[in-house]
Amino acid sequence: MSSAVVEKSQDSKSHSKTCLSFRGDARELADSVSLAASVSPTKSPRAVLQNLLLHGREGVLEVTGTDLEVAIRVRIEQVEILQDGLLLVNAARFLQILRELSGEQVEVTTDERAGCTIATGDARFQVLGEDASDFPELQDWPSEGTFSLPAPKLVDMIRRTAFATHAEKTRYAMNGILLDLKDERVHLVATDGKRLALCERSLDFTVEKPVHVVVPTKGMTLLQRVLGTSEEEIQLSIEDNQVHIKTSNALLSCRLVQGHFPPYEEVVPKDHDKPLTLPREAFLSALRRASLLATKDSQAVRFRFGREGLELTARVPEVGESRVQFPLDFPYDDLEIGFNPSYFADVLKVIGTTEFLLELKDERSAAVVREESEGHRYVYLVMPLSLGG
């Protein structure tokens, strides 16, 4: 299985001992370096991956970090390159020093012993480095098969789906976010088997070749950080088992997650007959109160919907019981159903409206949170829990 990086060519290795020297603001450097450092593992069988590769050339500093599954190269233009060259330095130590020197001008220089000196007017740090030729190289940007997406839309879609992915790596396709493009729309979908988040946005172009791939959650959340509040158009390219994403100041490559992603369109309910419009903040507060006594092993809350409103009840053995009344108009037959309240709390944090639509059917069916507007659709499912006696 190929990785998000490739081994360096012999030509690249021939420049590995060129001494790099540059000067810049420590805070600005730290902000960019932290993006690359977030990929570098703190522990790895390959110790070289705990480092960052810094490459100064043509007035620009490029910082690369990788764990062989996700790789990122960040461009920093707000620096003065005093001498082109390469530097391989421990990611955690380098970032820690830059953050401590925040607000000061720093000068970084390397020497032939593969170490570096980080200096300000009143401080000087000498950090041992390694041979830059040992560091794997980020793959070049593919020459074809690219398409563009607006950054603000993609950032919002990641924010609305990433929290629903599965944390355990043994769940394969559930460890990432499905990127599904076809016709004139894009879907991001995430699930952990107990809930599912689907975000759809319309496109102003028609997709020539459909895309259906699972991108690692780590890569998607890193992209979210890189883009921030940017209004730019980003470029994506899919080749083999890799996705490459290019922004104005970064190039991100991720190994695609292997495995079969669940047929999500088939599980989105279309026949729920009990819609409710609820106040977001008040409902979130009620959920928090009802789950105050919850433990890791006992997270079920009993939702009793009736003419008198909603009662939230949680009984935790050897801990106690919570009971919260929530006023609402429920013009349907009484319904009693169990849920993990944190699953609702997660989605309410990413919905920006003051009210939200909750759809119910019966005690065996998933609850559905919906939000729709022109060019946008968001669907979130929460599976019910068994309440026992």
Image (cartoon, rainbow, N blue to C red):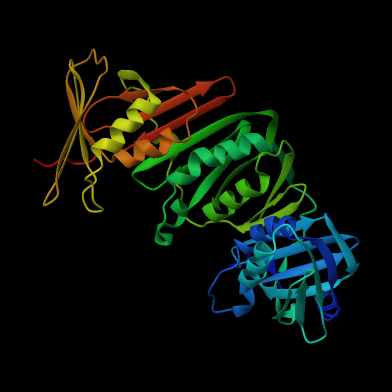
Say if residue 269 shows up in the picture.
no
Percent x, y for residue 61? 81, 62
Farthest-out residue, bottom:
113
Apparent side of residue 13 relative to residue 385 in the rendered image (left or right): right
Location of residue 358 (image quadrant): top left
Percent x, y for residue 269? 36, 28
324 over 330 or under it: above or below: below
Q: Residue at x 66, y 49 (%)?
A: 226
Farthest-out residue, top:
331
Position of the C terminus, as image quadrant, is top left
Location of residue 381 (image quadrant): top left
Apparent side of residue 193 relative to residue 109 in the rendered image (left or right): left
Q: Residue at x 22, y 38 (%)?
A: 301
Of 338 and 26, which appears nearest the observer? 26
127 over 302 or under it: above or below: below
Of 76 and 337, which appears nearest the observer? 76
Q: Residue at x 59, y 23 (%)?
A: 375
Of 27 and 370, which appears nearest the observer? 27
Percent x, y for residue 105? 79, 62
Say if residue 204 shows up in the picture.
yes
Q: Residue at x 32, y 22 (%)?
A: 272
Location of residue 5 (image quadrant): bottom right
Of 355 and 140, which appears nearest the observer? 355
